[in-house]
Image (tube, rainbow, N blue to C red):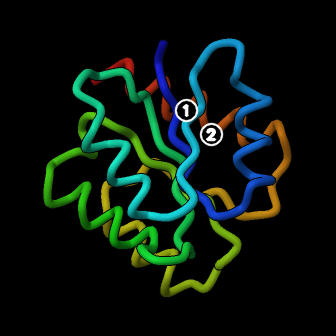
Amino acid sequence: MKKIIVADDSKIIGNIVERAFKDNYEVVIAYNGREAIDIVKNCVDDSIVGILLDLNMPEVDGFAVLDYFKENNLFKRIPVCIITGDVQKERIDRAFNYDIVDVLAKPFTFDNVREEVEKIISLNSMR
């Protein structure tokens, strides 16, 4: 089954995405950046169709995950959408220095997250 990774320390966000997509995708939740990187490293196939990535997480933040993606040329294989409550212009601009799909500001609605995930899945299928 295809996977969507949700890298966010909020269980609520993970639950929203899981409810939205559990019928069609395996939703894998990482509560910090280290877990997200480990999930990507341990996936030996192309089953990950996208990642929703928070910038502010404990231990390893979202920017470290973005650095890992850049260093390993993963943006071409796994589309990334930033989900964040931090809407400071300089942090958003910094995120767009990476090859991300979009930024979704928290709080968001069920429909917002569905649209973003469908966008990254669509991009993934074109790669």
Residue, disc 1: 119
- In the shown orientation, is residue 38 left or right of residue 56? left
- For this rendering, which residue is in front, 54 or 27? 27
Q: Where does label 2 land, which residue?
A: 116
Depth check: 116 or 49 in front? 49
Q: Residue at x 22, y 27 (%)?
A: 44
- The residue lying at 25 percent from left, 55 percent from top is 69
Residue at 48% in and 43% down: 51
> Marks 1 and 2: in contact by CB < 8 Å?
yes
Looking at the image, residue 76 lies above or below residue 59: above
Q: Tell me residue 107's x, y (percent).
A: 82, 62
Q: Label 2 is placed on what type of residue?
A: Glu
SS category of the residue bearing label 1: helix
Q: Amino acid at mark 1?
A: Lys
Task: Specify the quadrant of the image occupied by residue 68.
Answer: bottom left
Q: How many marks?
A: 2
Looking at the rendering, which quadrant does residue 11 occupy? bottom right
